[in-house]
Amino acid sequence: MRPGLVFVLVCLSVFLLEFAECQKDANTKSKKQNAGGKVKLTNKKPKSKPKVKKVAAKKLARISIMTQLLQQGRFQKPSDTLVIAAGENLLLRCKGKHISWAYPSYLDEENDDGRFSKMTADSGINHRGRFSQLTVANSTGADTGEYSCWALDCDAETCRRDDSKTGSTYVFFTDPRELFVPANDYYMAIQLRTDRPTRLPCQVTNPLAKVSLHREYPPELIPEDGKLITFDVKKGFVIHKALPLFGGTLYCVASYQGLRQSSTKYLLIFTYYPSARPAATIEASSSSVHAGVNFNLTCTVLGETNIDVDFTWEFPGQQLGRPTYTVESQQSVYAGGQAVQSSQSVLLVDEARPIDDGLYTCTAQNQQGATSVSTRVNVLPRTGPGRQ
């Protein structure tokens, strides 16, 4: 074979081997590409962010310390609501060395019905070292209500309520002849105040009784809408927003298994009531006046309409017999784009004297409380003719 031809064949073989190696490298790189066409440069996993452990705020652990005696002689924790036939006994225990109780106030009345006010063996509260026991014997519908207890943390001088150790239950003493808890008064006057909800007790002895609210005159049913007026079998009817139309005499009607009865009548007296004590300001006609010159001070309260505000004054000359001359007024004004009531008291001081020099204080008071504001007036010597 010719030497030239051999050289050409050798070069061709080397070229084919180099081409095959390049193609192999290209295929290897292609396999390493991810779905987005990017080459993965490392197999190391990215470091995850350290986990932050959430720690819940510790809540005060509450322990129920109340138990109820069952007919079998066993004690168990009572449910939130108990239904017991009138005439049966109720016995509740609360564990603790020092225990305080709350129960229907009727049981403490100083009359024949207030059984807890008498030192009897069958009804009342007995403290027995490690526990306290409440007993209602020969129960009636009037005993219906909330029964609760709580432990007391006592030292040598005082006792404090321990809210972590409590117990409570609401007991209905069902009476087939009395659907409503008896009341002492045929009429009950209740303020229908604009600053808070109004409750009409209408307590029933049976939680299954159907209860409705009525107006005496003109006779009509007042519907329970679930918003403006609601009913709770343990609390009665609640009027959440006082309106003049609710004023008058209302009563409840309960019905159960063919028995229908009316409650005590509630005389609702609509009352505008302030939501807060008055915010008063004081201003003097002049902070400095010469002797012999008249001046005045104005105390102003901007607040809710139809709210009475009472003003009182304290001033230097008062202690030396200076009479109090005031002029008071009320009017509707606009402030902040809404109508408000401006109540004012103006203190008049005629012919200023040296004894009038000092601090002037105005106190404005409504049914929620009082606010006092003060300012100082300086009385200067006389000027001009007649100067002393």
Image (cartoon, rainbow, N blue to C red):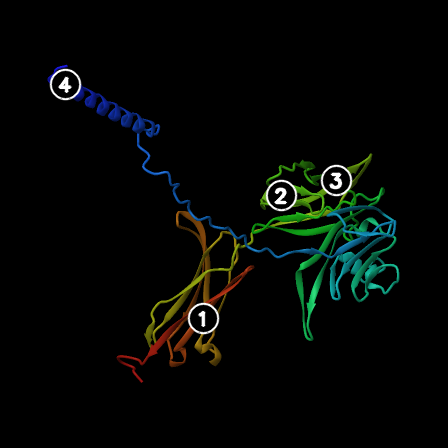
Q: Which is nearer the N-term, disc 4 or disc 2?
A: 4
Task: Give the farthest residue toward the top.
Answer: 1
- Residue flagged by tag 1: what amino acid is it? Thr
| Above-or-below relation of 232 to 104 | above
Task: Give the farthest residue toward the bottom.
Answer: 388
The front one of 227 and 330 is 227
Report the Cα–Cα distance between label 4 and label 3.
121 Å
- Residue flagged by tag 2: what amino acid is it? Phe
Q: Where is residue 9 in the image (x, y as percent from the top left)?
A: 17, 18
Q: Where is residue 227 in the image (x, y as percent from the top left)?
A: 59, 40
Report the Cα–Cα distance between label 1 and label 4.
122 Å
The front one of 309 and 242 is 242
Would residue 109 be seen by someone viewing this image from the given angle?
no
Report helix, strand or loop for mark 4: helix
Q: Name the residue under label 1.
A: 361
Would residue 250 be seen by someone viewing this image from the given angle?
yes
Q: Which is nearer the N-term, disc 1 or disc 4?
A: 4
- Residue flagged by tag 3: what amino acid is it? Val
Is residue 204 rendered to the left or right of residue 371?
right
Q: Position of residue 119 (x, y in %)?
A: 86, 65
Q: Which is nearer the N-term, disc 1 or disc 3?
A: 3
Q: Name the residue under label 2.
A: 246
Report helix, strand or loop for mark 2: helix
Q: Which is nearer the N-term, disc 2 or disc 3?
A: 2
- Residue flagged by tag 4: what amino acid is it? Val
The front one of 211 and 116 is 116
Task: For label 2, count other residues whose C-alpha is less than 10 Å away and answer few (under 14), some (14-19) or many (20+).
Answer: some
Report the Cα–Cα distance between label 2 and label 3.
17 Å
| Residue 253, numbered circle | 3
| Above-or-below relation of 318 to 150 | below
Q: Where is residue 324 in the image (x, y as percent from the top left)?
A: 47, 72
